[in-house]
Structure formats: structure tokens, C-alpha cells
Image (spheres, rainbow, N blue to C red):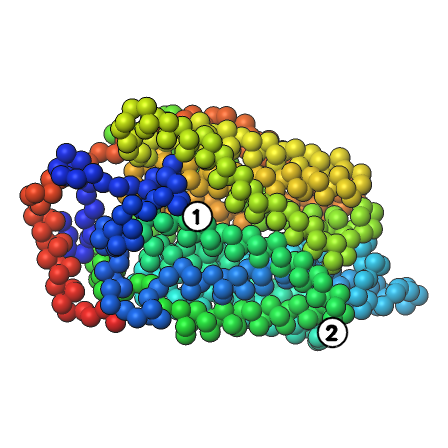
């Protein structure tokens, strides 16, 4: 039976069928030596993706380097506006609260609230409760809408290209910043609830989630597999550097200009520059040939779905949780231990992301309260920058060092002793993965307990530094969980993880903001009890993960000397596409 023409057939070829050895870059390959013997030309011969860009001038050839500068601006804007936006919301809510109190009681006297100033009178219980609720509403609105929109934009980009939708993903941020500026300039005309309009616009365009998905997709389009991890690592370095330096630069910028609103003008400018640079300058990474093929395949899938008119088919098509079934695989090669590993890793990853996305706001509210440290814009920005920088160092220095000591050197020793190159494949998480994850979660638990029991600023800041090493956990999980399935199921598995990420962005703010609302003024540290409990459950789950458990990869070896009919059809189709569709 021949394969459908719109599918790209990917087969493995037995090594015995090759007359020469295959150079592979694996997890234990040195970054500098990977591919060094064969050079870049060898990569171009072995990765078919280079054919899509053959003959193009440099300004039309896609590369991750096109994205580094605009992405750095994007993350600086994102990180730099975190603390000022929270403090602006506090001022807007406080202004309305005192005005409402004065309307009810004409004898009520209060110090006037000046937008962007150091309004210490605003840190009262009622204001903090209102702030926690409006930030919860904003996070929920953006999270729910982006959970629906981001996967659709990712799927749509397969058919119509990455860069246009990447520019679109930042348009919602422009609208959100404009709403913030308008509310700040005209607080008595536009209620702070108008901030929800900005959250709706941001969520409808996918927010930061869609931007990250599309940027990673762009990088994957124009980077061979052996270098893809390094290139995406550059983007992650930009992300955490933006989160590290953005708040710090914003804090000093506010001190220099004397205006909190100046940060939002700079953030707005960064969004606009990103949109125009990506939309007009950055080359498209997805060739016309690949776009047309994806459109044709999508049309055929839609026609097949239209033929099934049953109600159950409609329910399955609309079920947003359908991708989660891969986390509980059944059939040949699956086992209960494999299912336990996948569930434990995905549960842990969901907790880590949910805590990272949700706890930050309430931690800052706790830190800026006069009953605790009484921090302002600058102090809060310094704290976020310091913690983010430690996280960057952990990912760029500590993790590669651990990988070298526990993977690269032992593998080199085995090759030297045996004289045989060991070919690696997806054989499950190894012992190093398990212990790195447990160390990261232990640092998270320790840091959360430090937050809980801290009675001075120094201990609180040091606790934040300890939690920064928890950043090793997310990176390790993303790598380890993909080792449990064959390469052709990695995308499906990460799609399921993406659904859990969306759920955590919704459930996390509900848990933390609601708890803070209920306990502020009585037991403000309750949020740290919840944080330590969640990290503790994740730590327990990490001990359920066993190394070298994976789903068996069943495939039929294909000899290079005699391609089958399906392969011939695909090769013929590609040749025809190359003739009919010029790559320009």
C-alpha cells in the first residue's frame, strides 16, 4: 500500500546498509567538535532543509541570528514592565479605593495618591485584596485566551509561514500597553477594569506564549537537528537575560526620568520595533513549497473530518484535552513504568511552570508591603534581576558543566577503552537527569521555606537565589521527557505538555491570588506554605521517575539500495514540486 502523497515519509536506514560511517551529534558530543571533521558542507549534504534556501542571497536566507536582536528587545520590554505595571495597578486601585471611601464618608481624610509616586498609604489590606483580584482577572483572561489561540497560531504558521504570525503575536502587546498608558493618564475617565481590554487583546493574539512557540518553530525550520539545541539555547539566553536586565533597567529608568509611565512608552516602542523588524526585515523560514504542501494536507484532513457527521466526532474534535492521551500510552512497547514516568515528569513540569507564572506577583506584593520590606520599584527590580541572573548562570554554566562531567567524559572514556563509537538513541531519562531534577526541586523547596521563615531582607533575597537553581528542573524535564518516546512522537508529546502549561497558567493565578486575598493581613506568608507544598509534591514525584524506561521504537529497516514504492512516490513528488514551485 502506497503512502499518501501529502505525507513526508521518514524512515530509518540500517547501519549495515551504509558503506561508510555516519557522523552524529548526540547529547554527549562536544559543541565545538560536533561536525567539525566534516564541516558545514557536510551538514548541508546531510540535512535536506538546506535545499529550501539554496541559492538565496544572505538577506533572504533565514537564520536564528535574525531573531536575536528583536527577541532581546521583546524580552527586555516584557521583563522591564513587570514591576512598574504592578505598581501602577496598585496606584490606580488605591486611588479609586480612597475615592470610594471618601464618597461614603465625607469626613474620611487621606493622603492624595500620585500616579507613579511612592504611595506608601496604598499598602493597606483592602487595596492589596483588590490588586490581587484585578491581577488574577488579567492573568486569567490572558491565560485562557492564549491557551486557545497559541496552538491555533502554531498550526496556522505551518500553512502560512512564521514571521507574519510572529509579528501578529506582538500586536496584542501593543494594544495592552496603549490601554495601560491611557488608564494611567486618564484614571478618572477610564476605570482600571479597562486593563482587562488590553488583556483580551493580548490573549487573542497569543501573548508571550505564542511568541515563544513561533520563534522556536522559526528556529527549527532553518537549523539542522544537530545544532538546533544550541540555537534555541541562544534564544533562551535572550529570554532570561531580558528578564534579568529588563526590571533593573526599568527601575533605574524610572529613577532617572521620575515618571513611572516612561517605562510603558519604552515598552510600547520595543513592541513596535519588533513588529516592523520581524514583518519587514526577517526572512521567512518556511518555503512556499512547504506551505502549499501543509495547506493541501490540512484541506484533506478537513474533508475527511467533514465526512464523519456523528456527534461524538464533533465532541472529539472540540476536546482541548485530547492531546493528553500520549501521556498514558498503551499498546506494543508501553508499560506501567513508562506511564508512571511520563505522568510524574509532566506533573512536575506543570507545577514548575505554574509556580513560575503565578507566584511572582504575590511575592512582589508581599515584599512591597510596609509590614515586610517596604520595597519600591528599584528594590523589586533589583531582586527580580538578581534572581534571573543566577538562573541564567545556572543554565549556561552549571548545567553544561554537569553534562560534561557525567556524560561527555564517561562516554569519551568508553569510546577510548572499547574503540567503538556508541550510538545514542531515545532510551529514557538517565541517572544524571533524575538527580539534576531532584537537586533542582530540592533547591525550590529550600528557597520556598526560606521565604516563609525569612525575617530580614538578606535571608529573603538569598532564598530567591536558591530558588533560581530550580531553573535547572524545567530544562532537564524538557530534555528528559522527549527521551521516553521515538523521535516521530516527540512533537505530539510536547503538544500535550503545552496543554498542561496552558492549564497551569490558568489554575496557578487562581490558587495564589485567591489565597493571598484570603490571608492578607492575617498570615501573609500563606502563599509560601502553598509554594513549598507544591514543590514538595513535585520532589516526591521526581523520585518515581526511573532511568532507562522508554517506549520501544518499532520500525521496518529500509535498505538504501532498493527504495520502496512509497519512498519513490515521495521523491517524485518532491522533484515535481521543485520544478513547479520556484523557491523565491
Q: Residues within 10 Å of mark 1 (few under 14, many from 20)?
A: many
Name the element at disc 2.
Answer: loop
Q: Give the quarter of the image for residue 522.
A: top right
On screen, residue 143 versus residue 106, left or right, reads left
Any mark on residue 188, and which? 2
Q: Is residue 110 left or right of residue 571?
A: right
Residue 167: % across, % down: 44, 68
Q: Mark 1 points at which residue?
A: 498
Q: Please say whether residue 427 is visible from this viewpoint.
A: yes
The residue drawn where x is 78% and y is 62% is 94
Residue at position x 74%, y 59% in the image: 377
Outermost residue to the right:
107
Q: Position of residue 424 (x, y in %)?
A: 31, 34
- The answer to whether residue 288 is above or below residue 483 is below
Residue neighbourhood size for the residue with mark 2, other residues' Cα within 10 Å, grouped as few (<14), some (14–19), many (≥20): few
Left or right: residue 416 compared with residue 297? right
Q: Which of 357 and 28 is in front in this view?
A: 28
Mark 1, secondary structure of its residue? helix
Which part of the image, by quadrant, shows the C terminus?
Answer: bottom left
Which of 247 and 320 lies nearest the eye of the viewer?
A: 247
Q: Image check: 241 left or right of 386?
A: left
- Residue 542: tell me if it is visible: no
What separation in Å lies between label 2 and label 1 (alpha carbons)? 40 Å
Q: Closer to the camera: disc 2 or disc 1?
A: 1
Provide residue 317's location: percent of width, then percent of height: 33, 51
Quadrant assignment for the N terminus:
top left
Say if mark 2 contacts mark 1, CB within 8 Å: no
Residue 130 in the image: x percent, y percent?
Answer: 72, 56
Residue visible at 50% across and 29% down? 435
Residue 382 is tagged as: none
Q: Residue visible at 54% across and 39% down?
A: 398
The quarter of the picture where residue 583 lies is: bottom left
Amino acid at each position: 500500500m502506497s503512502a499518501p502523497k501529502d505525507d513526508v515519509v521518514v524512515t530509518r536506514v540500517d547501519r549495515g546498509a551504509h558503506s561508510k560511517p555516519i557522523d552524529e551529534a548526540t547529547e554527549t558530543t562536544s559543541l565545538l567538535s560536533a561536525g567539525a571533521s566534516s564541516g558545514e558542507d557536510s551538514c548541508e549534504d546531510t540535512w535536506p532543509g538546506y535545499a529550501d534556501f539554496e541559492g538565496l542571497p544572505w538577506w533572504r536566507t533565514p537564520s536564528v541570528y535574525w531573531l536575536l536582536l528583536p527577541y532581546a528587545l521583546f524580552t527586555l520590554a516584557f521583563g522591564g514592565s513587570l514591576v512598574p505595571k504592578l505598581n501602577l495597578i496598585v496606584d490606580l486601585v488605591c486611588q479609586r479605593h480612597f475615592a470610594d471611601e471618601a464618597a461614603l464618608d465625607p469626613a474620611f481624610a487621606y493622603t492624595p495618591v500620585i500616579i507613579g509616586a511612592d504611595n506608601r498609604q496604598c499598602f493597606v489590606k483592602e487595596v492589596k485584596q483588590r490588586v490581587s483580584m484585578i491581577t488574577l482577572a488579567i492573568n486569567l483572561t490572558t491565560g485562557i485566551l492564549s491557551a486557545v489561540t497559541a496552538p491555533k497560531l502554531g498550526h496556522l504558521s505551518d500553512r502560512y509561514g512564521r514571521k507574519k504570525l510572529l509579528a501578529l503575536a506582538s500586536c496584542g502587546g501593543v494594544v495592552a500597553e496603549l490601554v495601560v498608558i491611557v488608564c494611567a493618564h486618564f484614571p478618572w475617565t477610564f476605570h482600571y477594569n479597562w486593563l482587562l481590554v488590553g488583556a483580551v487583546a493580548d490573549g487573542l493574539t497569543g501573548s508571550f506564549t505564542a511568541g515563544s512557540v513561533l520563534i522556536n518553530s522559526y528556529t527549527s525550520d532553518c537549523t539542522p537537528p544537530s545544532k538546533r539545541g544550541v540555537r534555541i539555547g541562544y534564544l533562551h539566553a535572550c529570554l532570561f537575560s531580558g528578564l534579568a536586565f529588563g526590571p533593573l533597567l526599568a527601575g533605574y529608568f524610572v529613577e532617572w526620568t521620575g515618571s513611572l509611565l516612561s517605562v510603558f512608552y519604552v515598552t510600547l516602542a520595543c513592541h513596535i520595533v519588533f513588529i516592523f523588524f520581524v514583518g519587514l526585515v526577517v526572512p521567512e523560514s518556511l518555503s512556499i513549497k512547504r506551505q502549499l504542501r501543509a495547506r493541501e494536507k490540512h484541506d484533506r484532513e478537513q474533508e475527511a473530518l467533514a465526512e464523519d457527521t456523528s456527534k461524538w466526532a464533533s465532541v472529539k474534535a472540540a476536546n482541548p484535552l485530547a492531546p493528553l492521551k500520549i501521556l498514558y500510552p498503551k499498546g506494543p512497547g508501553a508499560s506501567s513504568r513508562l506511564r508512571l514516568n511520563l505522568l510524574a515528569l509532566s506533573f512536575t513540569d506543570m507545577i514548575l511552570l505554574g509556580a513560575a507564572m503565578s507566584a511572582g506577583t504575590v511575592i512582589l506584593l508581599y515584599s512591597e508591603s510596609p509590614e515586610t520590606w517596604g520595597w519600591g520599584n528599584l528594590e523589586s527590580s533589583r531582586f527580580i534581576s538578581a534572581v534571573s541572573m543566577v538562573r541564567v548562570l545556572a543554565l549556561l554554566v552549571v548545567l553544561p558543566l554537569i553534562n560534561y562531567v557525567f556524560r561527555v567524559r564517561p562516554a569519551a572514556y568508553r569510546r577510548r577503552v572499547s574503540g567503538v563509537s556508541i550510538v545514542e538513541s531515545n532510551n529514557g531519562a538517565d541517572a544524571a537527569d533524575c538527580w539534576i531534577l531532584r537537586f533542582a526541586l530540592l533547591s525550590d523547596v529550600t528557597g520556598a521555606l526560606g521565604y516563609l521563615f525569612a525575617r530580614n531582607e538578606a535571608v529573603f533575597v538569598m532564598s530567591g537565589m536558591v530558588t533560581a537553581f530550580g531553573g535547572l528542573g524545567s530544562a532537564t524535564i524538557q530534555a528528559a521527557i522527549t527521551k521516553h518516546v521515538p523521535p516521530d512522537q516527540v512533537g505530539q508529546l510536547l503538544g500535550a505538555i503545552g496543554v498542561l502549561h496552558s492549564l497551569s497558567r490558568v489554575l496557578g493565578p487562581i490558587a495564589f491570588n485567591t489565597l493571598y486575598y484570603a490571608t492578607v493581613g492575617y498570615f501573609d506568608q500563606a502563599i509560601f506554605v502553598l509554594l513549598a507544598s507544591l514543590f514538595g509534591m513535585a520532589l516526591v514525584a521526581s523520585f518515581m521517575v526511573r532511568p532507562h524506561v522508554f517506549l520501544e521504537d518499532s520500525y521496518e529497516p529500509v535498505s538504501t539500495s532498493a527504495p520502496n514504492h512509497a519512498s519513490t512516490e515521495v521523491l517524485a513528488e518532491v522533484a515535481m514540486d521543485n520544478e513547479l514551485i520556484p523557491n523565491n
